[in-house]
Image (cartoon, rainbow, N blue to C red):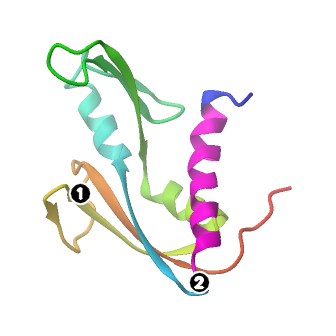
Amino acid sequence: MLGAEEDAVEQPLAILRNVNRALHPGGKCVFTVLNGYRMIRAQSAAAGEARLEPLTLSEISTGPPYEGGPLMTVRERGFVPTELVLLFRLGGMEVLHLWGGTAGSWDRHDLDLDEYEIMVVARKAGECPTLG
C-alpha cells in the first residue's frame, strides 16, 4: 500500500499516463489544478480552517457538503509549476503553457501566487517513459 507521499505522485501520474494513451501523436490537452503556492500562502491566514500537509501539498478540511449535511473530510491536492512540468514529462507530454486563473477569470497570463488554479496546456510528446 502506498503512503500518502507516494500516492501524491503516483495518482496524478497514472491520470496523465492514461490521458497520454488516449491522445493522438501531437495531440493537446488542457488541465486545471489547484495552485500549491496559494495553498501555502493562505495557510497562516486560515489557521484552524484547514490543515496543510507539507509533504503532499494537500489541504485537509472538514465540513458538510451542503447546509445541514453530514460532516465530511476533504483532501485537496495543490501543485507547483516545476512539479507539473516533471509530472507531465513523466506522463509522456510536453508542457506548452502554464497560466494562472480562477474559475470565471481565465485568460493567458502569468501565474500569480495567490490565484486558485493553474491551467496547463500540454502536447503528447511520445510514449510514457518507464521508471526503473
Q: CA distance from mark 1 to mark 2?
A: 32 Å
Secondary structure of the residue carrying numbered label 1: loop
What numbered label is drawn on residue 24?
Answer: 2
Amino acid type indicated by mark 2? His
Q: Quadrant of the image for the C terminus?
A: bottom right
Q: Quadrant of the image for the N terminus?
A: top right
Answer few, some or many: residues within 10 Å of disc 2's Cα (few below 14, many 20 plus, some between 14 and 19).
few
Which residue ends up furthest to the bottom in the rendered image?
26
At x 67%, y 28%, the residue is 3
What numbered label is drawn on residue 112?
Answer: 1
The part of the image, by quadrant, that contains residue 60 is top left
Q: Camera-side residue: 60 or 114?
A: 60
Residue 72 relative to residue 16: left or right: left
- Vertical arrangement, residue 120 with respect to residue 73, above or below: below
Q: Position of residue 94 (x, y in %)?
A: 55, 76
Amino acid type indicated by mark 1? Asp
At x 52%, y 34%, the residue is 56
Answer few, some or many: residues within 10 Å of disc 1's Cα (few below 14, many 20 plus, some between 14 and 19).
some
The part of the image, by quadrant, that contains residue 29 is bottom left
- Vertical arrangement, residue 39 with respect to residue 98, above or below: above
Q: Earlier in the sequence, mark 1 or mark 2?
A: 2
Identify the magenta region: 5-23
At x 71%, y 31%, the residue is 2
